[in-house]
Structures are given as structure tokens and as C-alpha cells.
Amino acid sequence: MKVLRDWKVRILLAALILFVATYSTLYQNRSVELPIEETRAQYTDTQDLFRAIPQEHFETETGQDIYDRLARQQSILGMQRYILSEKEGNTVEGLEEIVSDYVDQGIEMAENQLYFHAADDFESQELLLTFMPSEIEINNRLKFLNYLKENDVAIDWNPMSPSLVLYTLVNIIAGVFIYIIAAIFGADRFSRDQENNWSITQGLPYTWKFQWRQRTFISWVLIWMTLIIGILISYFVSRLSTDTGTLMYPVQLYDGESAVYISILQYVVMTLLLAMALSYVIIKLSTGLSWVFRNIYLTITIVVAIFFIPYIFTIISPLGSWNPFLYIQLLPMLEGEWADIGNVNIVKMLIAIALFYILIEILFHFIFKLIPTRTGRLERRKN
């Protein structure tokens, strides 16, 4: 394959697989907050609440109920802290009747927190709620815990578990990273081939459209073969260092109207497929622009700059969720950053990608007819 014979392409592919394959090792060196530390902080906050709220506010019927629930919260947090420290799952073997189940405790605690939000007749409610998550956060926590319960998945005490590292890596790839890689691979080779092989690229035996599409497809295949191999290596390397976590562990996904929880495996497959579809359009654009400008740096700058177009809509209105430029970035849609805009969802993203593909095809159909084939001679391609 001619593309692979290029030493620059081989270096880029080697660098790409090296970064992705070793990501889990690099990630292990990060300092992150363990769930047990968060639980300790919540336990301390509950103690501070008892001291901050005047005792007379607990003397009413509602106040006494809140006092009992806060005491129960502190008891639950103490048991959850112990469960997480033992690193055995949702309970501790041999002590199930004493420490109960982490997920059941979490559901009870979330329901208590929702009660605090509804207790409008409690005199210190405003102070109480400063120590509580918002109602949206509590309801999302309930969805998370119910997923664990329904699918019989244990809470993961380790944020460095292979499945969570895989989730983080896929999100990195699906962001600006894939724009940069696609821009680099598409930005140089097509124009060079046309200039260096001018005598045999005048539409015979292959039209310029065929060469453009072929170059795009080859670059796309090489990039994603490398990325997928690197992702698999990274995941299995991280499995060697720790045996915690499961691909069935839940992560949040915005479904257009609210947050839902799906398994990491589902999320990874879905996100990679969407990133693959979007990257094909990016590579096609980059390859075409390389022929227009014949300047690798300008081409890369333009393609990467397109990634930041959606940030314009943080200043001005995008005029609805059907604006295709909202879907230039994948993660804001999946993470619900466009929630205030309306029903932004995966179906609309697929339609937007298809529209961009058609637009690029039409655009370059005319652009290529206007560009001289070779510098120094104003000869145009005969299609």
C-alpha cells in the first residue's frame, strides 16, 4: 500500500499506537480522589450539620424527623466507608447482616436527601440544603444505584479500574484528539500525489473523485485500526495491574431529555462508532483542503478550528436542536451540555454527519474543477 510506504505515515501511526496503548499506564500515575475519601467528607459534613443547626429547630415534628434522618445518614456513611475500605463489593463477607448492602444504603440515603429538599417547614432548611446535592444530582444518583441493583453490579471502589480508564480514554479520543489526528493524516499526501504524479493523474485510469475518496478511506482505516488495537492493548495492560471493575459498570449518558445510565461497554461501542462516522467526514474535508491550499499547516489549522465552532453557541442562540453545527463535537451531546437547547440526541447527530458528508461532496465537486492541477502551469484537470 503506497500510503504505508511513506515513512512519515509510519511514524505517525507508531506514535499514535504508542500513546493510546500506554495511556492506562500514564493514567495510573494520576492522583484522584477515592470514593472512600468522598464518603469520609460527607460523614464530616453531617457531623458539622448537627452542630450548625440550632437544637430548638429539631424540636418540631418535622425537625425531629429530620434529626432522625440525619442520624441515619451518618450511620449509613459510616457503614459505606467501612464497605469501601474492605474492597470486597457491596458488602463485607460474613458481616452482611451488620453492614447491610452498599446499594440499598445509597438508595435510602438519596431518598432522605430528597425529603430534605421537600421539608419547606423546617426552619433551617436553607442551611441544611447547603450540605446536600441538588435534586437533579440526587435523582441521577438514584438512577445510578438502581442500575447497580437491577444488574447486580458491585460498586467500584477504585477510580483507576480498567473499565473506568477505558471510559476516560474513549472520551479523549472522541474529543479534539480525533480532529487533530484526522487533520494531520489528510492534510499533506493528496496534494503531493497530484503534483508528483501529474502525468498519470489526469483522470486516467482513475478520476480525481475516486482518488480523493480512496485516499480518505485508506487514511480512515489506518487511523481506526491503529486506535482500536491501541485501545485493546491499553485495556488489557491495565487489567494486569488491577482486577477491579467490570465493563458492565454504569456511566451517565444524556438521551436528549434526561440522564440515563448504560454500561461502559455499551457506551464505548456507541461512542467509537459515532467518532468513526464523524472522523470520516473530517478526513474527507482535510484531504480535500490539502489540494486546495497545498499547505499542511493551514489545512490542519482550519480543520481543528472547526472543532471549536459549537462554542459560539455559548454566546449566541443556536436556533434549536436541529442546528447541525451543534453536532461537530460529540461529547457535549453525550454529556448533556446542550440540555438547555432542547432534544439534542444521537439520531440528530447521525443526520448532521450525513448532511456534512453530502455538503463536502457537493462543495469539492465544483472546487476541484477550479484548481490548477500543477503549480507553474495553469492547466486544469480534465474530468
Image (tube, helix red, strand yellow):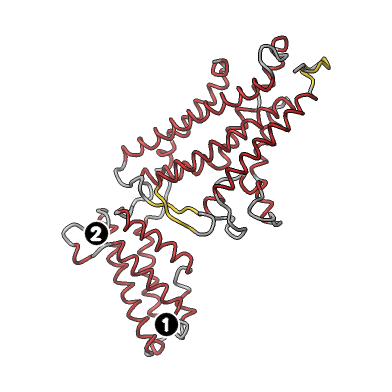
Dot 2 corresponds to which residue?
91
> Which quadrant of the figure contains the N terminus?
top right
**Mark 2 is on which residue type?**
Thr
What residue is drawn where x is 56% and y is 18%? 7
Relative image position of residue 325 (x, y in whole percent): 66, 46
Q: Tell me the crowding category of disc 1: few under 14, some 14 to 19, or many 20 or more residues within 10 angstroms, Cα based.
A: some
Along the polypeptide, which appears first: circle 2 or circle 1? 1
Q: In this rendering, would 170 be left or right of 381?
A: left
**Mark 1 is on which residue type?**
Ile
What residue is drawn where x is 51% and y is 54%? 255
Q: In this rendering, would 358 be left or right of 218?
A: right
The image quadrant of residue 12 is top right
Q: Is mark 2 on a helix, strand or loop?
A: loop
Position above or below: 25 against 245:
above
The image quadrant of residue 165 is top left
Position above or below: 84 against 112:
above
Relative image position of residue 219 (x, y in whole percent): 57, 26
Q: What element carries label 1?
A: loop
Q: How far apart are marks 2 and 1 (CA)?
A: 33 Å
User: Which residue lies most toward the right here?
Assistant: 378
> Which quadrant of the figure contains the C terminus?
top right
Relative image position of residue 334 (x, y in whole percent): 52, 50
Relative image position of residue 154 (x, y in whole percent): 30, 54
Q: In this rendering, would 249 be left or right of 368?
A: left
Dot 1 corresponds to which residue?
53
